[in-house]
Amino acid sequence: GLSEEVDAIQASTLRALASGHRVRLVHLLSAGPRDVRDIADGLHLTQTATSQHLGALRAVGLVEATRDGRSVW
């Protein structure tokens, strides 16, 4: 039912935030959109690792990606 659906959504959201890097990433983005290079530099991660973390957060709807030419915000 609806209660189980809500539980599943909440559990997937919490799993996505189970990484300190992802929590820091959400805090970093709370100030506004940034491109992946900026985020990677701010978190001292590779762009590949940053993209993977962003993908996990996007999958549960915590962040959105917007493409601007060759950049992704």
Image: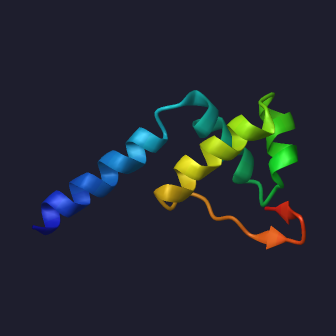
Q: What x and y, as percent, mark residue 13?
A: 41, 49
Compared to residue 16, the image places residue 46 above or below, namely above
Considering depth in this image, is 43 or 71 the residue closer to the camera?
71
Residue 21: image quadrant is: top right
Compared to residue 3, the image places residue 15 above or below, namely above
Q: What x and y, as percent, mark residue 5?
A: 21, 62
Question: According to the image, what is the colour scheme of the structure?
Answer: rainbow
Left or right of 63, for residue 67: right
Q: What x and y, as percent, mark residue 64?
A: 63, 64
Compared to residue 13, the image places residue 65 above or below, namely below
Q: Please identify the quadrant where the C terminus is shown.
A: bottom right
Q: What residue lies at 15% left-to-right and 68% top-to-bottom?
A: 2
Considering depth in this image, is 16 or 69 the residue closer to the camera?
69
Residue furthest to the left: 1
Q: What residue lies at 59% left-to-right and 51% top-to-bottom?
A: 55
Considering depth in this image, is 28 or 11 the residue closer to the camera?
11
Q: What x and y, as percent, mark residue 47?
A: 79, 40
Compared to residue 26, the image places residue 23 above or below, namely above
